[in-house]
Image (cartoon, grey):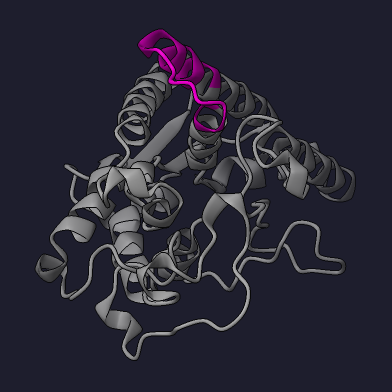
Amino acid sequence: MSKHILFAAEYANLPLIPPSLQPEADFSYGANFASGGAGVLNWTNSNFNMINFMEQVGQFKDMARRLNATLGPTKTREILGQAVYLFSIGGNDYIYYFIDFYSEGQSSTQSDQEQFVKAIVGNTTNGLIELYGLGARKIAFQNVGPMGCLPLFEMDYPEYNGSCIPVLLSMPILHNKELYETLTDLAERLEGFKFSVMDYLPSLYDRMMNPSKYGFEIGRAPCYGKDCKDYQGPRGYGSGNYNLCEYPSAYVFFDAAHTTQRANEQLAKLLWDGDPSVTRPYTVKQLFEED
């Protein structure tokens, strides 16, 4: 889960939401089912034992069953129906899709890319329908960001000369369009289903390319591991000494893949109550206020 989604919970006056697998945790205010580096598809980052999206849905189902056994079906349905469900997933699937093709010296066709996007959005939709069947009604997404512009790719793929990787921009754009259309369809078909989407891709991209508009000095180079030399990206993990910048708040990125606290706070504000041009058709704030 992106850190700014956790920041958004603060706007709802919620305490830090504990991981769903934490023993003896207090889940009175919610549970965090996220798994760092996870994807929608089973094989994304599978070598690192990430908990993929459908496995996370399965863990939620287990928690719902426990609630039902403790509180009874009526109270459980009420709690799950009033809860807001925040999602940030899909970006890792596209990164590893690109890596797989690139490592084999291949390039994917437009048809390949469209089919892959449909698989990601389709699997996401299946999970949402399962959640709806359990009582979930208020769904919020931060959509997929400008993955091809992440600083980590400057080191792993120097042949792009610091430019964004085109396929890792075009596929997220297509994904975000498909996701919004799918959520709109679900809202029309499923009684009580409401959703919010924060358009993360242009929001982050503009901060990267025009940092001074948002109070930053550096848009693409990371604070931690300057110029990406200390970060091995999706092909491995950095080791040894790291170079930490003096003023992280001047940077959009903390390391080569994750934004700084200041950027997170700005993006969280958009998620919470951003302008309709960024967050629609509901904001997360409005979902919390809905009966």
Residue at figure coordinates x 61%, y 33% from the top left: 40
The residue shown at (34%, 70%) is 265
Q: Please state which of residues 43 and 122 is positioned toward the viewer in this rendering.
A: 43
Query: What is the quadrant of the N terminus in the image?
Result: bottom right
* Residue lying at 39% horizontally and 65% vertically, measured from the top left: 259
Q: Is residue 115 visible?
A: yes
**Residue 68 to residue 101: above or below:** below
Is residue 17 shown above or below 91? Answer: below
Residue 121 is situated, as x and y percent measured from the top left of the image, at: 50, 23
Magenta-drawn stretch, dominant element (helix, strand or loop):
helix
Residue 216 is covered by the magenta coloring: no
Span colored in magenta: 101-119
Q: Is residue 106 magenta?
A: yes
Q: Residue at coordinates 30% horizontally, 30% vertically from top-left?
A: 173
Q: Position of residue 46 (x, y in %)?
A: 73, 40
Q: Nearer the viewer, residue 78 or 44?
A: 44
